Amino acid sequence: MIELLAVSKTYTRADGAPVAALAGVSFSIDAGEMVALRGPSGSGKSSLLNILGCLDTPSAGRYLLAGEEVSRCTDRQLSRLRCQRIGFIFQSFNLLPRTTAVENVELPMAYAGRAVDRARALALLDRVGLSARAHHYATELSGGEQQRVAIARAVINDPPLILADEPTGNLDSAAGAEVMRLLRELHAEGRTVLLVTHDDEIAAAAGRELRLRDGALVGDTALAGAG
Amino acid sequence: MAAAKGRVHPLPPLAEKFEMPQGLRLAWRTVARNRLRSFLMMLGVLVGIASLTALDSVGESTRRETLRRFQRMVGTFDTVIVRPGANRSRGMPSLTNVEPSLKFTDARAIAAEVAAVRQVALLQNAFDVDVRSRDQAASPAIFGVSANWTDLRGEEVAAGAFFADEEVAGLARVAVLGADAAAALFPGQGVAGPLGQTVRIGEVPFVVKGVLRPRGAGPAGASLDNLVYIPVTTASRRLFNRDFLTMAIAQLRDPSQSETALRDIRALLRERHQLAAAAQDDFTLISPRAAFGRVAAMGGVLARILRGVAVLAMVIGGVVITSLMLVGVAERRREIGVRRSVGASRGDILWQFLLEALLVSAGGGLIGSLLGLGGTQAAIRLQHLPAVPPWGALGWAALLSVGLGLLFGVHPAWKAARVDPVAALRS
């Protein structure tokens, strides 16, 4: 599913000095894996996630997503990949505020070239246990509810890859547990799940752990968890 | 190790994406949810388009009305008017204020010798002449004219008939009354009442042969109906004892020949009046179409100033659109980031914001042109102007409002498209 070959990302600081966020990272993730990505802040996790999520392109190296060379894609092609291959889940949920839950779920459909399918959006909300809240505005929902809406949104276009950036970071433990249950469910459906986390317990849900430090991959361990 | 569970999510081929209706729906949603802001963005375009539409329609309507009145005065446009004297006096000529230089024979020569001229109508007129019927007195204008006058002026009789060439040749004492003169001299006798009765013009009796249809007001607003027509020969020999004309009107064979006609008539008259090469003309030639052009141009200046004001309002409206949209882009950075993360390309974002601008300005244009047309209807009804079809103005309004939306929306839309989704999602 994912293949990274010597991927580097270099930013230019305001004073003109280059900063290496990623330095020659290589690994591959097979379809259907559930992988935890860990590392201290500043280790390059976010940069790596942005590249994996096709929001950013590497400065050097190659990235193949489902066999497609991403590093040379145009903006339009990257958008198509984000739309149909990837589902994002953010720590801060990132729902549109003056928009109802169901409209938030429908959002990616508008960019996928098919008609918006309200029934499908409602079915997914039902699956994350929120059918009663479908017509509430995002701001009227609790954190846990917002994250479950975000999960429904992430899978509305049926993407094979889920990228979750600290999905439980802003949630209490009960809500976090519910979110993790849903993520494991997505994994069980055959989706590839990559999970950025600080939490040992949450990382343990994954079958494999990648560790980053100072922009380099320093560990790649198989775990006993769900993998 | 991964696919150990056996079930791997299928990979459908990538679909092509994003169509216009979706984008339009999206833009509409934003516009509808930010009503106050959308209204403020609309305002300038609305005011500009409204005044432009109204100006255009009222202007066109006024122009038509002026044309109508002008035409009512001169009859047909395809003429050259010959007036005695070099000075271009503005008012209507009469025996008391013209030079005695334009003779009957001059007019006949023009008709006979200038190829571009079909016929020439003759006029010898005086104002405020005492006219009496048996028991009433009035002072209408007396127009001594040739029988072909009606061809050029489009006079129509309501009762009786206009006099004919034979009556002109025979110095007949017949009169045709304008509607106002008829009403003043024969009150309460109806349109046909005066026929056959006698009126005294000065001391000379005339038999009423016809009564004209009312023509209404001329361009200056004065009535065109307070006059009495008599044969020009009778006027000259039996009434006024003058052998010169106050005006001759040459009707052209072909409207496009007015330049040729002007040149030939001028040459002929200079020759007949034996003017030296350096001498000024002792007559004036007027082309009604050119004269109307000057009248219409005076109205045009005011319209142009007002139009400038309307355009200014639209430009200000456009700047408001740009600045409010730029604020919107800054406020909606996160929304842009979210949309980008779920699959919107830069082009999609650009379109979304551009469509919002277009929707707002098109809305402003729509409401504005409706208001403008409403105002036009009111003006037309209040001033009794002729109605004009609004299609021209509406077309301009549509074109302008869409153009404004594009022009002033493209910069903020471009900015929205350039928002870095990574930074926007982190904020």
Image (tube, rainbow, N blue to C red):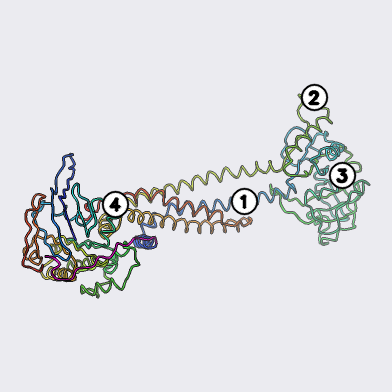
Output the chain of dot 1: B
| Quadrant of image for the C terminus of chain A | bottom left
Residue A44, percent from left and from top: 13, 52
Question: Do marks 3 and 1 share a chain?
Answer: yes
Residue B254, percent from left and from top: 75, 44
Q: Residue at x 59, y 57 (%)?
A: B389
Residue B337, percent from left and from top: 25, 56
User: Alpha-carbon distance for marks 2 and 1?
Assistant: 45 Å
Query: Who comes first in sequence, dot 2 or dot 3?
Result: 3
Q: Evaluate if marks 2 and 3 touch, with contact meaning CB atoms under 8 Å apart.
A: no
Output the chain of dot 3: B
Query: Who comes first in sequence, dot 2 or dot 1?
Result: 1
Looking at the image, is B178 positioned above or below residue A114? above
Task: Please give the residue where the numbered disc 3 appears in the rendered image.
Answer: B232
Q: Amino acid at mark 4?
A: Thr
Q: How many marks?
A: 4
